[in-house]
Structure formats: C-alpha cells, structure tokens
Amino acid sequence: MILIHPDRETLSFAAAELFVREARQAVAERGSFVSLLSGGETPRRAYELLARAPLRDQVPWKRVHLFWGDERCVPCDDPRSNYRMVREALLDHLPIPPSHIHPITCEGGADAGAAWYEAELRAFSHGGIPRFDLVFLGIGEDGHIASLFPGSRLLGETERLVAVATRENEAIQRVTVTVPVINQAALIVFLVSGEGKAPIVREALAGMREMPARLIHPVDGKLFWLLDEAAVRLAQEEGEGDLT
Ligand code: 6PG
C-alpha cells in the first residue's frame, strides 16, 4: 500500500501514529510489541513525535521491545551512531525498561558485534527468525536499505540474520540485519521523504531495475510505503502504481 503525505512533518506524524496503533494492538493481542527501527535522517522526526504527548502517553512502553536494523561501528555517542539518534530523539524521553532496548554494538569488533546481535535475535525468537510487529525502513538514493547496498553479496544471504557490511568509500564497518529478517515481519514500512529520493522511488515502485529495496516482500505480512509529495513526484508524473 502506498500512502502519500504533503510533507515530511505530516509523513512523520503518520509514521508515529502508525507505531502507536500497531503497538497498542500487538500488546492487546499478544502482550508485547517488538519493533525494528531504521537509522538515517528520515525517521528522526517520527521518533521525536513519539517521544512527547499526546502520542507518547498512548503507547504501553513497558511492553515494547526495540531493535535496530543496522549500525555503524562507531562509539555509541558518535553522531553517526543510529543508537545515539534514536536515544536522543526517543529513548531519553520514555519510560521504557532498559532491558527492552536492544542496540547493535560493535564492542570487540564488527564480526563479534554481528555474531552477538545474531544471538540476541535468535534468543528472542527461540532460535528462529524473529517476527517483528513493525519494521521501519529508509531507502538510500542508490536503493539501499539498512546497510544492504547494491551489489553486496549479503543481498543473497539466507542463513545469517545479521552480518558485517561495508559501504564503498567508507572507512568504517557496519552491522546489518539481512533480508530474511525484514521479510519475516508482520508490517514493513518504508519512510521516504524529499525530492532527492524521487528518482529511486520512481524506479523502486515501477520495478525498473534491481536494487536492495526490491528484495522486500513480506513472507506473511504487509508492506506500506509512506512517502511525501516531493519523494513521489517523479513516480506520479509517470503514473506508476496506484499513486492516488
Ligand atoms: C542508516 C540506514 C539507511 C537509511 C537510508 C536512508 O543507518 O543510514 O539505516 O539504510 O535508512 O540511508 O537514510 P535517510 O533517511 O537519511 O535518507
């Protein structure tokens, strides 16, 4: 399903409201809500809105578990850290038990960090692939998702849940979940904002070429694209999909 909002603020509010709705429903039905969060700039505002009234007070935070889709191997207070971004925007303002916060860490190196996070995910799902209630994803201008970049061998990964990734021309290593983890989720939501994303959104929605984002097909769940008008403009001009 494709949902278009006028601008980043309304998109962010819609994403935050969706989180609230899914969290309340999951807790009512199953007693807990487990979400995989995206880094990047786009979701930051949604996290900020979730961190304050009225939305903050509508979430049963003590029943919420938060995981990360990817992380750069940098100290946790580094401005490039996805954990730091989410902590500042969201976690610092919530009554969420610390044991329910599951950041990726690279203590001991990227390989050790990936192995540890794999064990963390497996432990949370009795050895299998966790079924997240909600996954937020961004998309890069090259079609990457989490830290799964075009051309990466990790795109075909079927065994590992978590792996070390590198990005061309970037010195640091990263740790990322793999495609099967994302596709196992009950609800996957792309958050995409701004005219810089318009070309890749057009290509992604039209299936014009292969890219990591095109590997996302929930096994037994739903896929939403939350876009703002700037991001969807080129796709709309070509009349791709059901862009109403
Ligand atoms: C990250 C990501 C990455 C991100 C996209 C889009 O940590 O950077 O998880 O996949 O979602 O690069 O990023 P923006 O929202 O900043 O455009």
Image (tube, rainbow, N blue to C red):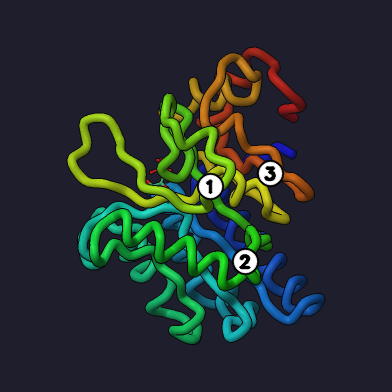
Q: What residue lies at 62% left-to-right and 55% top-to-bottom?
A: 14
Amino acid type, callout 1: Leu
Residue 28 position, x and y percent, is: 79, 79
Q: What residue lies at 30% left-to-right and 35% top-to-bottom?
A: 167
Determine which quarter of the picture holds residue 88: bottom left
Alpha carbon of mark 3 to alpha carbon of mark 2: how far? 28 Å
Q: Can you tell me which quadrant of the image ligand 1 is in? A: top left
Q: Nearer the viewer, residue 14 or 215?
A: 215
Residue that label 2 marks? 127
Determine which quarter of the picture holds residue 132: bottom right
Q: Is residue 222 among what the camera can see?
A: yes
The label nearer to you, 1 versus 2, is 2
Residue that label 1 marks? 137
Amino acid type, callout 2: Gly
Residue that label 3 marks? 224
Q: Is residue 6 among what the camera can see?
A: no
Say which element carries label 1.
strand
**Count of picture labels:** 3
Sequence-earlier tag: 1 or 2:
2
Q: Which mark is residue 109?
A: none
